[in-house]
Image (spheres, coloured by chain):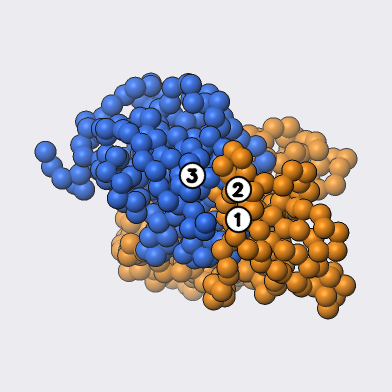
Chain colours: A orange, B blue
Amino acid sequence: MLWLCVVSPVQEKHALKALASWAGQFSSCVCLDAERRLLWLEIGSSLRYFGGLDVLLKKVAAGLHALTLKATIGVAPTPEAAALLARQPQTLPVLQLDHLRQALAALPLNELAMLPAAIAGLQASGLTSVGELLALPRDALARRWGLQATDYLQRLLGERADPRKPYRAPQTYYRRFDFAEPVQTVEGLLFPLRRILYELQGYLRGRDAALQALNVAFRHHDHADTVLTLRTTDPQRDALRLFALLREKLERTQLPGAVTQIRLGVERFVALRDTQLHLWDESERHDASWSDLLDKLRARLGDQAVRRLGLRDDHRPEKAWCVESGAAAADLPPAFPDRPLWLLPPRPIERLPKLLGRPERIEAGWWNGEDSSRDYYIAQTAEGSRWWLYREAATARWFLQGIWA
Amino acid sequence: MPPSSLIPRSRPLPPVLQEIPGIWRAHELAPVKARSTGHGALDALLPGGGWPIGALTELIPLIEGIGEVAVLQMALKRLCDEKRHVVFVHPPYIPYAPALLSAGLLLPRVLWVDAAHDEDAHWAAEQTLREGAAGAVLLWSHAVADRPLRRLQLAAEAGQSLAFIYRPVVTLDSSSPAALRIVLRPAPAALGVEVLKARGGRGGAVFLPVHAHV
């Protein structure tokens, strides 16, 4: 076993848990000690997957950097040794148990996870380094400082097993971020939002999942929460892409007041399509950038502004089309006579332009009380425009309903 | 001179250079990539023999309802056949689904983007062009200034789509950064297409039968 220990600069319990969820992308066994602000990842079993220790360490470091956390890390075959190394500036990973004693020897005593009284006592008797302590006979140590002290040293060196309860990431994702001071500007929200999304990305990678909907709530002092829901066309887990979409949405949202807290939640997860991870062929690439584009347009203009068209089985021209909400719009066989490109809400006309050809009678709606009988004509105005007109049979009034553009 | 297909037209200028008007890149002098309009007489007038790819085409109809969109129909239909998308940004009226379908534009391939104002419409068109995900973008704009057009021209160069902008008649007198500028006028049983400006082309006018009905 090989342990990577992270000393977290953040203290709050929910922030530490978020960090543990984030770490799930690097290891299937993550352990947490909230009191000591320590996070352990068992990386022995994931080294091969990541292509070696150097690559993995670089990834962890880049990940922490993206979270804007100044965390130090240590690597050793036992959790306590890794923790000890992590508290030092600039230590080399220790990969084998045999090398542990030597690697720890020069470290100062005061970093050991022993009772402060024990450390003070040892220092008072003239010891300064871990090496000097380890050279002392264990039974004498146990008599003077209790079994607790020797038990710790045994676990430190791997002489005794050190089983730990792995942290289990929750099944639904929820993250809270409290501001020390209410935030007035959107810019002030973006910074923590980006970090939260990077945490989420790590969690999603650990679960090998993606999302298609995401809720973010902003709490205000004396107003109801502002809630934004982000929906994406394709499954997503890329932090920067989600950030760009949320930012677009946020910048177009009127916040009623300063923000005291951000809450982010994801309830449902989906599988990520392989096409987003691996090489894709040209048509899939177009599809991927197409759905990215749809997301971007919807984030700024609103879901309602980005429309797909569909047909409806109705003879009345204004009811023969619809905006499709679903992903796939079904095509009915195109059995339509000539129709104009632009459809207008019917507007009465005063002067009748020149009518071309014979009328098309359209009768529909008699079964549900919206009875209508109309004679449709193609017409040409004096200026040269083609119009689609109808004469309402009941009233003999003329309306413009379409334009041949 | 290398064939135009080897020249990377997709790379946008660095942001600093984008702000400077009138920068010409060497490849812009290369043969124009284009897509047939489906009208031989019109293709003959246009540089590259069709609607330019990766460049902005400005269309100025003198009046609406003369076939100002129908003139694009054959090119748009072919894009749909190739499974590319056609995006209508901020059209003046509802694009009528039965008419689109009759014109061969498969509905799942058509996107209608509405915008509250011109600025959003230009933004949407620019994003769509830059992303290069659509086969064609048609934008209806009220903008009179040429700055938004310059941005669109650059976005069009970044992507590889057909880019059409419909502009009001009042813009006829002002200059334009578009690569191709066309006036559309009504004519008896036809559409008059007059090429005002064509980068690398000869210009001229043709009459096209775009209205099938009498």
Q: Secondary structure at mark 3?
A: loop
Indicate the quadrant where residue A90 lies. Answer: top left
Q: Chain of mark 1?
A: A
Q: Residue furthest bottom?
A: A367
Q: Chain of mark 3?
A: B
| Badge 1 element | strand
Q: Chain of mark 2?
A: A
Q: Is label 3 on the same chain as label 1?
A: no
Q: What residue sits right under mark 2 in the picture?
A: A380
Marks 2 and 3, how far apart in space? Answer: 10 Å
In this rendered view, identify the residue nearer to me: A377 or A203: A377
Q: Is residue A305 left or right of residue B168?
A: right
Say which element carries label 2. Answer: strand
Q: Which mark is residue B188?
A: 3
Per the rendering, the mark at residue A356 is: 1
Considering every residue shown, the one lying at the far left of the view is B1
- Residue at image position (15%, 45%) is B3
Image coordinates of residue A333 in percent, x first then y, are 54, 76
Name the N-terminal-most of marks 2 and 1.
Answer: 1
Q: Residues within 10 Å of mark 1 (few under 14, many from 20)?
A: few
Determine contact: label 2, label 1, CB under 8 Å.
yes
The amino acid at mark 3 is: Pro
Measure how far apart labels 3 and 1 are at the Cα level: 13 Å
